[in-house]
Image: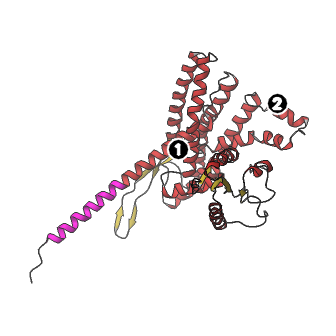
């Protein structure tokens, strides 16, 4: 008696992460259950001719196991999520009729959709949580490789202890800097509504030491990978100019570190002033709300003061980002330590952890308030029901 085929299986991961090889191996393992056929759920693979940057399976891989929803339309044609659901549902039914297992393989687009669903239904930013899980999942493997170097004698115990202490110090530094704020005092004047006069209040305008977050490090890393990407596309035809650029801008080289630092500083200022903290809009909003900074006139003077304060704060913030991002490069190039630590990974892990904890606490607080409101409503109903009817 032939074993019953599995209803469906899904294999999800980022682009170029080895999903195709894993899917082929899984399909071979499912031969005992009648075999498998692969359904691609990556929106970039449905288009013909889009072979660069999509990690599309090769002809040899396509010949090993039947694939579906690959190279089915031209780039000028549209293919919506509803079209995919219709086609995938029909394909899954047909594959089951043939006695095989539908193996659904997805990439970055599916992870983006999954992140949006987590954001809408869960706690925290879904995409950030997925990236966080991917980084944390690699920590045990990297830690095991690092400790195995110590057991083999390649790394001395003093270096291992020093790296562990450095990890604790850097995490503490990141937590401190991500929570650091510069509070600007805001004063509101007295206001009169009808015949009533309300006293003026005061508040604080918080300005983070690192208002740009991890974005500058990501942008700078992308620019540093540009020469390598061009060389990969060029193949064997790399010219002398590109070869010189690759030689001088290799990981750990002085020009590489200097360019990395400069790009982090540039994108910190650029992203802060254009996206995360627009001083002109903040000054205009304060003016519209009748708020002012003591000793500073509303309007243009407030904008200049905020720009002055934020510029001085970002000197410290950009230096902190550059230090955290250069740490893994220095460890690998100068100390020859194969353990990747620091950079965008620790920034993402710490930021997502802090954001998730804050959102969990806010949900718990809101739940407590909801419970108190329900109890007060029940008590109010009991009191109103226990009152005696009025006499006529």
* Location of mark 2 (residue): 247
Query: In 3D space, how far apart are the residues under numbered discs 2 and 1 (Cα atoms)?
Result: 36 Å
In the image, is residue 149 part of the stretch drawn in magenta?
no
The region drawn magenta spans: 367-390
Q: Residue at x 55, y 30 (%)?
A: 170
Q: Is residue 179 above or below residue 112?
A: above
Kindly indicate the quadrant of the structure image that contains residue 334: top right
Along the line of sight, the residue nearer the viewer: 340 or 392: 340
Kindly indicate the quadrant of the structure image that contains residue 268: top right
* Quadrant assignment for the N terminus: bottom right
Numbered circle sitting on residue 352: 1
The secondary element bearing badge 1 is classed as: helix
Please provide percent x and percent y for residue 18.
69, 43
Using a 10 Å C-alpha cutoff, classify the residue at mark 1 as few (fewer than 14 neighbours), some (14 to 19) or many (20 or more).
Answer: some
* Quadrant assignment for the C terminus: bottom left
> Which secondary structure type mostly characterizes the magenta part of the structure?
helix
Q: Residue at x 67, y 44 (%)?
A: 25
Please provide percent x and percent y for residue 32.
62, 48
The secondary element bearing badge 2 is classed as: helix
Along the line of sight, the residue nearer the viewer: 57 or 374: 57
Please provide percent x and percent y for residue 195.
34, 69
Of callouts 2 and 1, which one flags the residue occurring earlier in the amino acid sequence? 2
Along the line of sight, the residue nearer the viewer: 30 or 206: 30
């Amino acid at each position: 008696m032939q074993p019953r085929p599995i209803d469906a299986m899904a294999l999800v991961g980022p682009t170029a992460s080895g999903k195709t090889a894993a899917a082929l191996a899984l399909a071979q393992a499912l031969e005992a259950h009648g075999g498998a056929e692969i359904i691609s759920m990556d929106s970039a693979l449905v288009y013909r001719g889009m072979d660069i940057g999509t990690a599309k399976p090769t002809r040899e891989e396509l010949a090993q196991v039947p694939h579906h929803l690959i190279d089915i339309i031209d780039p000028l044609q549209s293919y919506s999520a509803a079209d995919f659901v219709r086609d995938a549902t029909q394909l899954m039914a047909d594959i089951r009729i043939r006695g095989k297992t539908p193996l659904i393989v997805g990439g970055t687009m599916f992870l983006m959709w999954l992140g949006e669903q987590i954001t809408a239904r869960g706690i925290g930013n879904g995409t950030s949580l997925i990236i966080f899980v991917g980084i944390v999942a690699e920590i045990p493997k990297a830690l095991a490789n690092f400790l195995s170097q110590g057991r083999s004698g390649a790394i001395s115990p003093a270096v291992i202890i020093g790296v562990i202490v450095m990890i604790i110090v850097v995490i503490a530094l990141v937590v401190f800097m991500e929570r650091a704020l510069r509070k600007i005092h805001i004063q509101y004047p007295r206001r009169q509504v009808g015949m009533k006069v309300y006293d003026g209040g005061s508040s604080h305008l918080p300005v983070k030491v690192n208002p740009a977050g991890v974005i500058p490090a990501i942008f700078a890393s992308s620019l540093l990978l540009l020469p390598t990407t061009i060389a990969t596309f060029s193949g064997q035809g790399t010219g002398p100019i590109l070869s010189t650029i690759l030689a001088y801008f290799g990981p750990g080289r002085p020009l590489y570190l200097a360019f990395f630092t400069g790009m982090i500083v540039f994108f910190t200022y650029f992203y802060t002033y254009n996206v995360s903290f627009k001083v002109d809009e903040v000054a205009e909003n304060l003016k519209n709300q009748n708020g002012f900074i003591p000793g500073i006139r509303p309007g243009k003077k407030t904008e200049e003061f905020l720009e002055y304060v934020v510029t001085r704060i970002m000197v410290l913030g950009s230096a902190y980002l550059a230090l955290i991002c250069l740490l893994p490069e220095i460890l690998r190039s100068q100390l020859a330590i194969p353990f990747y630590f620091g950079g965008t990974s620790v920034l993402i892990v710490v930021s997502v952890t802090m954001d998730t904890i804050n959102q969990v606490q806010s949900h718990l607080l809101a739940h407590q308030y909801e419970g108190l409101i329900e109890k007060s409503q029940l008590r109010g109903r009991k009191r109103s029901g226990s009152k005696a009817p009025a006499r006529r």
